[in-house]
Structure formats: structure tokens, C-alpha cells
Image: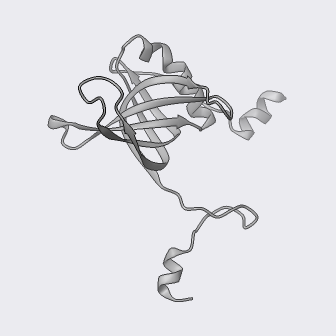
């Protein structure tokens, strides 16, 4: 195998019986917004949200918006828990991990940009590492490990 070919082969740390895939993860900090249940015409309903991710110099922050499907089990519980705070217009900041981002073109339907094209960055919210509401840290639910589950069952 040439060096060029070896650089393009997918790598994974999972057993060989599972499919290989390329990971694309984004880690960051941002404001949690627009938590909603999406009910597609075909397929199962799912939890979605948007995150305005902060980037750049803290004295002159810029934002990148992500429109996300919440897929991690723990992330679903945390986002659902934070929904009343977001709906109440409180600032909710989270540390996050997003996977599989991709751009999607859309056309603005109303407002001063009506008829113009825009780009949304889509992806999957995999993990929430921390959360703050109004600047105060929130204790996040933790999924018990197997050893914790075994000890509570005794």
C-alpha cells in the first residue's frame, strides 16, 4: 500500500466486526438555543437544538451557529433538562462535542433577507460537558457506569 493510500484509509479503534468510518468532531463552548422536537413526515421524531458557538478573542467574540440533531443519550437528557431555562430566555452556555458537520443551503422565507440564500451548518450533538445558566454552574445528570450499576443492585 502506498503512503497516499494509507493516509486515506478509515481508522477506528472499534473491533473489526464493526463498520469503519471517519470521525469529524467539533468541541467548543456556546449558547444553547431553539430546543425543539422535530416530527418529520417520514421517520421517527427527534430532539433538535441550535448552538451559537463562541470563537475568537474573548474581548471581541464572534459566533458560528450550528443546527443540531441531539443524538447522544446523555446529551438528550441534559438538553431536555435545560429546555425550560432556554424557553425562559435565560442565557444557557454549554461545553459541547458535535459530530458529522455539513453545510446545507436554504432560502430565507421572511424578514429583510426573504428570498436570499443562506447556509446552515448541520450536525449531531453528541456530548454536553458542562452547563451554566445565568453564569451559574448546573449539576448535570451522570449516566452510571457498569460498576456503579452493579453495586447499587446488591
Residue occupying image coordinates x 51% and y 75%? 8
Direction left: furthest residue: 59
Quarter of the picture containing the N terminus is bottom right
120 or 76, which is in the foreground? 120
Direction right: furthest residue: 154
Q: Quadrant of residue 22?
A: bottom right
Does residue 62 sit above or below 8 in this rendering?
above
Residue occupying image coordinates x 26% and y 30%? 113
Q: Position of residue 124 (x, y in %)?
A: 52, 42
Does residue 15 sit above or below 130 in this rendering?
below
Q: Position of residue 81 (x, y in %)?
A: 54, 19
Does residue 26 sit above or below 41 in this rendering?
below
Q: Position of residue 148 (x, y in %)?
A: 72, 34
Residue occupying image coordinates x 39% and y 24%? 132
Residue 70 shows in the view: yes
Residue 46 left/right relative to 34: right
106 or 52, which is in the foreground? 106
15 or 41, which is in the foreground? 41
For the rendered model, the colour scheme is one colour
Q: Quadrant of residue 153?
A: top right
Residue 134 left/right relative to 142: left
Quarter of the picture containing the C terminus is top right
Residue 141 shows in the view: no
Amino acid at each position: 500500500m502506498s503512503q497516499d493510500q494509507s493516509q486515506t484509509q478509515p481508522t477506528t479503534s472499534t473491533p473489526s466486526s464493526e463498520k469503519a468510518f471517519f470521525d469529524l468532531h467539533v468541541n467548543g463552548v456556546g449558547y444553547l438555543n431553539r430546543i425543539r422536537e422535530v416530527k418529520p413526515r417520514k421517520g421517527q421524531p427527534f430532539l433538535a437544538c441550535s448552538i451559537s458557538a463562541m470563537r475568537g478573542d474573548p474581548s471581541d467574540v464572534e459566533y458560528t451557529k450550528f443546527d443540531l440533531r441531539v443524538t447522544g443519550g446523555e446529551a438528550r437528557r441534559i438538553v431536555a433538562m435545560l429546555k425550560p431555562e432556554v424557553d425562559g430566555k435565560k442565557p444557557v452556555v454549554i461545553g459541547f462535542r458535535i459530530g458529522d458537520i455539513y453545510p446545507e443551503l436554504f432560502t430565507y422565507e421572511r424578514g429583510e433577507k426573504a428570498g436570499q440564500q443562506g447556509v446552515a451548518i448541520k450536525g449531531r450533538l453528541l456530548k454536553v460537558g458542562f452547563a451554566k445558566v445565568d453564569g451559574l454552574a448546573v449539576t448535570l445528570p451522570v449516566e452510571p457506569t457498569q460498576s456503579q450499576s452493579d453495586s447499587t443492585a446488591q
